[in-house]
Every structure is written in structure tokens, then in C-alpha cells.
Image (cartoon, rainbow, N blue to C red):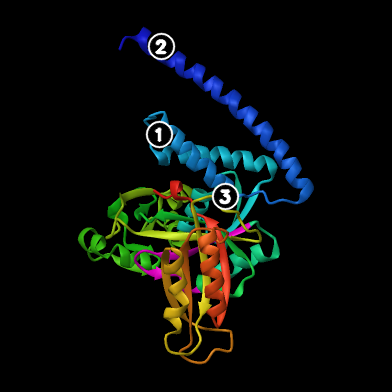
Amino acid sequence: MTPEELKGFRDRIDALDDQLIALLAERARIVQEVGRNKHKVGAAVFRPEREVAILERMCAANRAHQGPLPDQSIASIWLEIISGCRALERVMRVSYLGPAGTYSEQAVRTLFGHRIELFPCASLDEALHMAEKGSVDVALLPVENSIEGTVGRTLDLFLQSSLLISAEVSIPIHHCLLHKTADVSRVKQVVAHPQALAQCQRWLDAHMPGIVRLPVASNGQAAEMAAQDDSLAAIAGQTAAQHYGLSPIAERIEDDPTNRTRFAALGAFEPEGCGVDQTSVILSVPDQAGAMLSLIEPLARHGVSMKRFESRPARDRGASNWEYLFYIDLVGHKTDSHVALALAEMKSKAAFFKMLGSYPLFQKLSP
């Protein structure tokens, strides 16, 4: 390619960028008008079903145009457009399990973009209580890790809270070994959350033999410690590296590269259906033979798929020993006719029934 040809391509790119910025400005002005109307009626700023519909539509449009960008790239670009425009209505506030730099923060950014206000909390309880008090719009809580299993405390909080799940996102968990200078010869101890140490055990055995492993409360705390002491290396993610100014000694050191965590956003509003939905409920069964089979039979009869079925000892409800609650995730929205029929029958047969939410899945943001 000659310099003249390269200049011609760059001129075309610049012209397209000028068109894009003009269209973005027009889009933003329309969003501002929508925001003024929302403010008048007290409507929620975050409408996850609308955001998922936009992401799905744009990815489909890109494929229809045979665009070379993958769905994840298109979704990431449009997420930030949505995030920036949403902030023109009002900057969204999100609480999560801190400190800064954790995978929870990464999940917050993945779901809501970067034009938000973050509230890292010392516990899952505190994060949820901020949303219950209205101090934040939503709380983002970890629900399940593909290796470690369900986050029990989150399930307990689901049972206690009046808030509803409004969205779900899943992120990959890729661990890095981080240091102030990436000089491995200075490392005397590796610090991390106990789960992260366990998930990187084979790599540490092979590459850091004899180095002391120190468990701490979170990977974010580990990164903060490593930023202050060059004898420490931390296991954490790229978000922590960026936040604390650390350099990677090694990346993707987890023993299982398929490690993922699901997160749920809880708020005081209920999304409408968008076609990419999930419904979550908690229930218990009467103490009689065949009760469980009778309870879930409507799902098969009405053609409702079950994605998750998990039991947990009942607590805080005056339950006797060995009484269990069942957490169930179903495909579809509760207003879908077949889902609504199945749920109505299940509720009539259950000893206890609680709707946790019907909400969209941000699949395009889950690489």
C-alpha cells in the first residue's frame, strides 16, 4: 500500500467517524428527552430488558451486514454508548462486594459500562442493604461459581430481601500473578483469597515452588497489599492490576480455564420480558410422599425448561431440622403464557413460594 492509498483509507475512516459522532449526538439528545419524561413519572433509569434488546438487535444487524467484528465487540461498543446515554438521564449507582479491583467490580463494569457511580462494600449484606434503602439503584451479588458452586450467603439474602433480580451476567475468571515491577526474583509471598489460591494451585506448584502462600479476605485486598510491598505478589484480575498500578508476572494462571462466575443485579423494579429471559423462584414442598415430583411436573407438561435446581437448608423461617428450600431457575419470563401456567400450578402445590424475579440475561456481554 502506497502512502497515498493509506491516506485515502484514513480519510474515509475520518469521514465515517464524523458521521458516527453526529449520529451519537442525535441519539444522546433523544435520550435526554426520554430522561426528562422518565423523571416526570418517576420511572427507573435502568431498563435492562430494553438494553438487552438493543444489544441483541445490533449484533444481529452486524451479522446481517456480514460485519467482521464479533458479537462481543459490537456488544461492548454499544454497552458504553448505552452507559454514556443512561448517565445523561442520571448517573446510575451500583453497590457490590469490595474492595476496589475485585471480580465483582469487573462484573459491574461488564453489565453497566463505565459511566456509573461505584459503591464497594465490606459485605454482601451491606451491598444489598444499600439497595434496599434506596442509596443505590441496584446491588450486584455473586450467585454461583462454576468451580466452587453456589454462593450460599447470596441465596440466603435472596430469601430475606424484598428486592427482585433485574438482570444477570456471567464473566470469565482469569487470574493473574501481579507485582509492582513484575520482578519475580523479589517475590517472597503470594497473597490471594483462599479460593484463588486453590484455583491456581498447580500453576503455583510448578512456577513458584517454596514461595509462601498467604490467604487474605479478597483478591482486591491482595492487590492493594502488593502495591505497597514489593516482596508480595497478588493473585487477582486485570481490573485489580489497572486499579492498583500492578504489572503481570504471568496471566491466566488458573488451573481451569473455564472458570466463570454468575452475578445478579437486585433492584426495586421488575423488568418486562424481552425474549432472552430467566425466571428464578424459591419454594419448599409439603412433607408428603411424591410432593417434589408433583411440584415440578407442571414444568414438563407446559414445556418450561429448568436451568438450575438447588437445595439449601431452610433458615430464619421457624423451620425444623432437615427442612429444605429449593432454588429454581427457569427459561423464559413469568408473563410468557407457558411459564405463567406452570408457575401458577407450582405455587398452588408448594408449602412456600417466593418469586425472586423474571429478568433478561446479558448473554452478549458474557464472553
**C-alpha distance separating marks 3 and 1:** 21 Å
For marks 3 and 1, the one nearer the N-term is 3
First reached walking from the N terminus: tag 1 or tag 2: 2
Q: Residue 63: which numbered mark, if any? A: 1
Element assignment for label 1: helix
Q: At label 1, which amino acid type do we have?
A: Arg
Query: What residue is rendered at 46% in x and 19% in y?
Result: 13
Q: Residue furthest front?
A: 301
State the SS at label 2.
helix
Label 3 secondary element: helix
Q: Which label was assigned to residue 49?
A: 3
- In the image, residue 165 above or below residue 25: below
* Mark 2 vs mark 3: in front: 3
Magenta stretch in the rendered image: 138-153
Q: Is residue 187 magenta?
A: no
Do the CB atoms of the residues marked 3 and 1 lie less than 8 Å apart?
Answer: no
Q: Residue at x 33, y 63 (%)?
A: 189
Q: Is residue 141 magenta?
A: yes
Task: Pinpoint residue 315: horizontal percent, then vertical percent.
Answer: 54, 84
Q: Is residue 328 above or below residue 359?
A: below
Specify the farthest residue to the right.
Answer: 40
Tag 3: residue type? Glu
Foreground tag (1 vs 2): 1
Specify which label sits upstream in the sequence, 2 or 3. 2
Badge 2 is on which residue?
A: 7
Which quadrant would residue 344 be assigned to in this image? bottom right
Q: CA distance from mark 1 to mark 2?
A: 29 Å
